[in-house]
Amino acid sequence: MFRHVGASFALVAMLSICGQARSAPAEQPRSADVLFDEGAALLKAGKLAEACAKLAESHSIEPAIGTLGLLAYCHEQSGLLATAMREYGEVAELAHLAAQGAREKVARERVAALSSQVTRLAVALSEPVDELEVYLDARRLGASELGASTPVD
């Protein structure tokens, strides 16, 4: 029950701080604003996969802190906790740089809440191997990431 209360609070908080004071060029076939609105409506309707896709497309057309925050919430509700945690972290940093304290606070709270829930993976080598490349989901892990605990979905 508490998870749903917390999730509902987070949705209300993210929707209220995301705002829609954004503009996109009129020549865009599907503007970021339209995609954002569609994604938010789908999210409210519980259609998470479609909502996340629309929000991601909106953010790719016109990156915005609010869109990224709602996308993080969508990923959290979809069970992609590591993705959501990374996105909330990015929202917190961007909001800090933009002096948007309310957004930063909510995003940091979500990172903290997810930190204990996210699955982590550590890739450790028993001995160093020259020229070995390790990939996680098509992303090459740097030497500093080997042996470290990495959040994964």
Image (cartoon, rainbow, N blue to C red):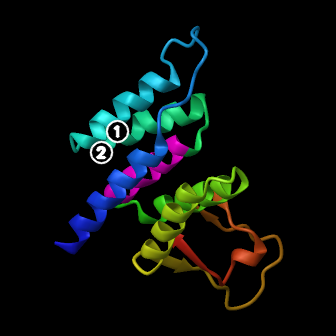
The vertical placement of 43 against 149, above or below, is: above
- The x and y percentages for residue 85 are 50, 64
Left or right: where 23 falls relative to 72: right
Q: Quadrant of residue 116?
A: bottom left
Front residue of 53/146: it is 53
Between residue 19 and residue 129, name the one nearer to us.
Answer: 19
Q: Amino acid at mark 2?
A: Leu
- Which residue is disc 2 drawn over? 48
* Quarter occupied by the C terminus: bottom left
Q: Residue at x 54, y 65 (%)?
A: 105
- Compute the Cα span from label 2 to label 1: 5 Å
Badge 2 element: helix
Kind of element beneath mark 1: helix
The amino acid at mark 1 is Ala
Magenta stretch in the rendered image: 66-78
Closer to the camera, 29 or 109?
109
Residue extending furthest toward the top: 27
Residue furthest toward the left? 1
